[in-house]
Image (cartoon, rainbow, N blue to C red):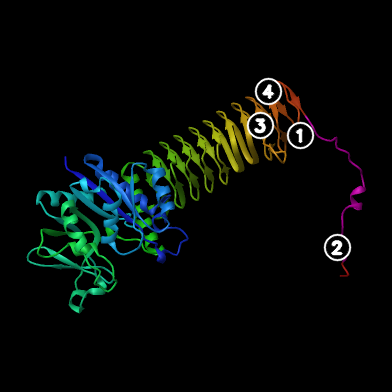
Amino acid sequence: MDSVGLVILAGGEGKRLKLNIPKPLAPLRGKCLIDYSLELCFNFLKDKKGEVSVVTGHRREEVENHITNRYPKVHFALQKNQLGTADALKSYFNDVSEAKKHKYTAVICADTPLLKASDVDVLFEKLTKQNLAAIAATFSIDTPKGYGRIVRAKKGFSIVEEKDSNAEQKLINEVNSGLYIFKTDYVLQHINQVQSTNAASEFYLTDLFQSDREVEAVLFEDGSRFLGVNDIYQLNVAGRKLNKDKAKSLMENGVLVLDPSHTYVEDEVEVAAGATLFPNIYLHGKTKIGEGAVIEAGCVIKSSQIEAHATVKAYCYIEKSIVGKSASIGPFAHLRAESQIGPEAKIGNFVETKKVKLAKGVKISHLSYIGDAEVGENSNLGCGFITCNYDGANKHKTVIGKDCFIGSDSQMIAPLNIGDECYVASGSTINHDMPSGSFAIARERQQTKEGMARRFIKKKDSSK
């Protein structure tokens, strides 16, 4: 099988984004802008032979480190100066040892997150079937300002950049997308002939498309997929389109998305059929939502697992945690990292957990903090319960057994072990272990002094 070298051009600075990061690392739905181009390339190669390379430039170390962490098989080339797309491709052939051995070379921009592998397939199939030297993707747009114009001829076509086009050419609505596939030997034969005699004094890869050569332009009906991200607004447009596609995919697979336009679900999130997603929720990272689970309005869930038939009530924040089957969370609960909430457990309003393991049926209904703790099956922790887990320097663990009742407004000073079936009276501060079946009360005896209240109650001076 003939191999393909896929080249992503990612050397630009991206000044119009006005972010203090390289353009390829612009954030987009939990990933970076360039991740979408990389995914496209590897999806394209699933049934083909080839390699993926990235041409970097501005702040190359940051870009290459990001890519290497996610895609260790990617090759890199350095474009030392921003002298145009043809110069970038020269850098690829100079720096990547296998580049010239591939029969075909595909060029992809790092800032086109809406493109799919299927779009590249369309070009590749036409190129190979017709034995063309080069092929480009084009689209039509009502306001073509800023785009290179496609000037078609009886045979082939040419691309004229905006700055170099005359008045007649500026009226052409068919424009260049920046997506190309070449025969590699064709590129190597002509790329050194490209001149920088243009308004931008750059070496344009588009000069390889000439009307007297075996080249062709494929006009795509949907030009929106070629959106290039050059500023924050375009980044937002791309994000909204990707989010819309994600919501549509979820609904097609049986997820009840009540208001897709106000439901944010990142690409790596998995939601099972039968789940219900209310408006204004934010599902991030590698979150998984189980069958029949309900996520109510205003919830933020990051890299967490919500198991089948669990309910996360309105305005909860959950991060790197697990919510068990048929459990209930919230409203207004905060599950911090490493919270494991067992099946059928209940975490009520204004409860915060951190690094806890709660067994089946545990109830913590309201106004409590539980950190660095384990709680056994069916134990009930009353309102205002606190684990005192931090001594100012180190964290300590609290262990509470099964079938315990912990009264309201109680504190436990860790490290501490409470056995099974223990009872702690309301208002107690517990700092000693309790064996199973024991009762503890730790509070001052009430003293009532009749008539003494007037010494403490202050009355307003009516003369003032």
Name the residue that disc number 1 marks. 428
Query: What secondary structure prevails in the magenta region?
Result: loop
User: Of callouts 3 and 1, which one flags the residue occurring earlier in the amino acid sequence?
Assistant: 3
Q: Looking at the rendering, in which quadrant would you find the N terminus?
A: top left
User: Of callouts 1 and 2, which one flags the residue occurring earlier in the amino acid sequence?
Assistant: 1
Name the spot of residue 18 as percent of width and height, x first.
45, 65
Name the residue that disc number 3 marks. 397
User: Of callouts 3 and 2, which one flags the residue occurring earlier in the amino acid sequence?
Assistant: 3
Point 67% across, 36% down: residue: 395
Where disc 2 sits, the SS reads loop
Viewer-nearest residue: 179 or 96: 96
Q: CA distance from mark 1 to mark 2?
A: 36 Å
Q: CA distance from mark 3 to mark 1?
A: 18 Å
| In the image, residue 248 above or below residue 424 | below
Where disc 4 sits, the SS reads loop
Q: CA distance from mark 3 to mark 2?
A: 49 Å
Check the image and name the residue furthest to the bottom: 167
Amino acid carrying label 2: it is Lys
Name the residue that disc number 2 marks. 460
Q: Which residues are magenta?
A: 441-461
| In the image, residue 22 above or below residue 433 | below
